[in-house]
Amino acid sequence: MIAVAVAPFGLGHHPPAARPAVLCDPVKGGETARSSACRGGFVTNLSGQRGNPVIQAGVACKPEQEVNVVVFAPCHQTVPGETAVPTHQDTHPGPTAPDLLHDPADVCQCFLPRVPVCRAQGSAEEMVPADGVVAVLPARHRNVPEWSLSKNNRVKGRQMKDTVIGVDLAKTIFQVHGASRAGEVMFRKKLRRQQFMQFMATQPPALVVLEACGSAHYWARELAGAGHEVRLIAPQYVKPFVKRQKNDAADAEAIVIAARQPEMRFVEPRTQAQQARSVLFRSRERLVHQRTELVNALRAVLYEFGLVVPQGIAHIKRIEAMLDEAVLPELVRQECLDLLQQISEQSVRIDARTKKIRMLAQGSETACRLQSMPGVGPLTALAVEAFAPDLQTFRRGRDFAAWLGLVPRQFSSGGKERLGRISKAGQADIRRLLIMGAMTQVNWASRKGPAPGSWLARMLARKPRMLVAIALANRMARAIWAMATKQEDYRDPALSVAA
């Protein structure tokens, strides 16, 4: 049996603070009640034996578990150390049993606003309501999670949901796993693609968690339109929670378990505009890779006949001159000319997409602001808009640089810090472009000489150029975060110091 302290009240009634009460005796002054509906691990419906309506109490219980309800009220005799039994004139009618709420998220909603409870105080674990009533209960009898106290509780600006639904996405068959916040399994379903949205539309608003994959952003927008709160989680964070066998049901359950971890990190869903820009960016990158493949194939053919050509697209004119002058079999010459034609066609497609990217960058205020920084052009600015989440989600610029992967990998242990090279973790597209932009500044400073006494001059004096480029890319990422969050253009540190 567990003791539950509740305060009966009438509409608008508050026990006066001038008459403090001591805790009533759990046997003599209490009422015994049973939980007629214990859902989600909490008492949701209590009725007293003597006809006295009992207010909900937010304590853990089991179905049909006997609960000793201790009712406090202002007592006429408040001698220290005595127990006071509430009388009928001290108690006031409260909500009747049918009026009690049945949602675990509404636990204590009907009495906490009128009798606000402060935090535990002192070693005696006193719980002091604002009206002066003192209840001494063990901490294990007050184990109501914070998310269940009120529907209006919010975490990071989002309304908390009572149900967590994990979805293992696929092309045709979707596995759905539903559970409460406490971990109680509610349903497991295997649905076809056509049935998935019909099923989710019938569910009350819940927290839906998906693995971040190819179609996750599309389904995130669809589920958000149906009234759900959607979060994406990286697959590598789900894998540790898979139990033994790997299958769709185990994956969906692992998604729910991972999402319930308070320190879990999530992926921000992308908008349609972000996805459209990323498609344009990736299309150009694909064409560049294909053109590079054709150029290398052409160089390999010429090398077999004793003609050596350096790497790079800039040497195409040189290859054309070689084909006119060199003595080659006619069959080889025709194949080389065909490769040159394919390279030319790919260059035309790349130029068309580059022009689109520049037009998009000119029409975006954020992209224009980012291009005010040396080493950042239209491609880098568009990549930040397409692939990065809202930069306001990062607390500081260092977090954004770490998200990009512009930090050394750690092998620290025993209080000793060991830092290695940067890893492949993070957003590779933005990181690569920032490193390229930083390398252009390093090359320029190496040829022309950096500003005396500047950070770049000090780094180049004692570090390799590539390491300096990585460090400079880290600084550029932090500056991008500051420019985007503060809505300011780039300010040259050297000019700021001189001013």
Image: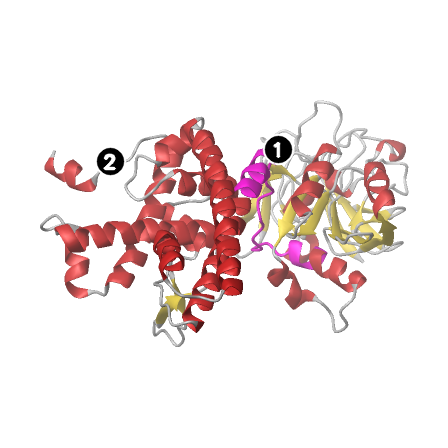
Pointer 2: what residue? Answer: 491
Q: Residues within 10 Å of mark 2 (few under 14, many from 20)?
A: few
The C terminus - image quarter? top left
Report the residue at 77% width, 43% height from top. 104
Region rendered in magenta: 256-280
Near mark 1 (Cα within 10 A), the count class, few <14, some 14-19 or many ≥20, is some
The structure residue drawn at horizontal position 86% and vertical position 50%, both measured from the top left corner, is: 191
Furthest residue toward top? 12
Say whether residue 200 is visible: yes
Question: Which amino acid, by three-letter code, is at mark 2?
Answer: Arg
278 inside magenta stretch:
yes
Corner quadrant of residue 58: top right
Answer left or right for 296 relative to 45.
left
Residue 5, magenta (yes or no): no
Find numbered disc 1 in the image and state the secondary structure of the residue it sits on.
loop
Which of the colour schemes (rainbow, by chain, secondary structure, one colour) is used? secondary structure
Please give the residue where the numbered disc 1 appears in the rendered image. Answer: 19
Instruction: Check disc 2 and report its element: helix, strand or loop.
Output: loop
Rendered location of residue 483, percent (x, y): 35, 36
Query: Residue at coordinates 28% horizontally, 35% vertically from top-left?
Result: 490
The amino acid sitting under disc 1 is Arg
Disc on the earlier residue, 2 or 1? 1
| Horizontal arrangement in the rendering, residue 451 relative to residue 293 (left or right) | left
Distance CA(mark 2)–CA(mark 1): 65 Å
The mark tally for this picture is 2
Mark yes or no: residue 108 visible: no
Image position, residue 61 (x, y; %): 80, 54
> Based on the displayed image, in which of its 4 quarters is residue 79 positioned?
top right
Placement of 270 over or under 165, stated as above or below: above
Residue that appears at 74% across and 30% down: 9
